Image (cartoon, rainbow, N blue to C red):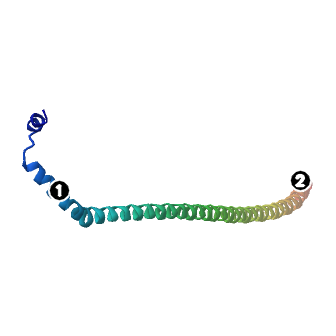
Amino acid sequence: MFSSLMQALGVNSSFFIQFLIFLFFYPLISRFLFRPYFKLHIQREKETLERMKQVEKLKEKKEGLQKKYDEKVRYINEEFTKLYQQESQQIKEHFLKERINNQEKTQKEYEEKKKNFLKEVKEIEVKMQAEVSQLAKSAGDHLVS
């Protein structure tokens, strides 16, 4: 039965020789091939884990710097907005004062011209009244004579 099983599996007399060769070379292969490979593999895993930790630290540092940058940008924008609003308000106030001054100046000029005009009208009116009275007197004298 054992021999029929061996024949069914295709095992012949060379199997034992192959097994002995395997037993002889396995320790050599294990020592010079497998162990260095596994040491290298373990070393690479450690390095990879260490690098992943460094990457995480760098990410945290980057996020911290990004937050600081965002805060500085926000602060600068707020300060710029304040300065802009202050300057804008000052410019508005300046132009409003200029406008008011111009309106007052124009109003004064208008009042003075109006006053001068009314004065001229009065003078002309007085002259006309004098001329009318003189004409009336001369017409009355002319009619009487």
Percent coordinates x, y for residue 11 in the rendering: 10, 43
Left or right side of 103 for 129: right
Q: Which residue is mark 2?
A: 143
Nearer-the-camera pick, 16 or 92? 16
Whether the residues at callouts 1 and 2 have beta carbons within 8 Å, the answer is no
Dot 2: few (<14), some (14–19), or many (≥20) neighbours within 10 Å?
A: few
Instruction: Choose top left, top right, bottom left or bottom right for residue 77.
Output: bottom right
Left or right side of 40 for 137: right
Residue name at image x 82 percent, y 61 percent: 111
Nearer-the-camera pick, 70 or 119? 70
Left or right side of 42 for 33: left
**Residue flagged by tag 2: what amino acid is it?**
Leu
CA gap, disc 1 and disc 2 = 168 Å
Nearer-the-camera pick, 118 or 63? 63
Q: Which residue is mark 1?
A: 22
Determine the residue located farthest toward the top in the rendered image: 1
Residue name at image x 49 percent, y 60 percent: 56
Residue name at image x 79 percent, y 61 percent: 107
Q: Secondary structure at mark 1?
A: helix
**Residue flagged by tag 1: what amino acid is it?**
Phe
Percent coordinates x, y for residue 8 in the rendering: 9, 35
User: Where the C terminus falls, by quadrant?
Assistant: bottom right
Dot 1: few (<14), some (14–19), or many (≥20) neighbours within 10 Å?
A: few
Instruction: Choose top left, top right, bottom left or bottom right for residue 142.
Output: bottom right
Q: Reply above or below: 20 against 58.
A: above
Left or right side of 16 for 34: right
Mark before the other along the chain sequence, 1 or 2: 1
Q: Reply above or below: 51 against 4.
A: below
Q: Is residue 81 visible?
A: yes
Percent coordinates x, y for residue 73 in the rendering: 59, 63
Instruction: Choose top left, top right, bottom left or bottom right for residue 127.
Output: bottom right
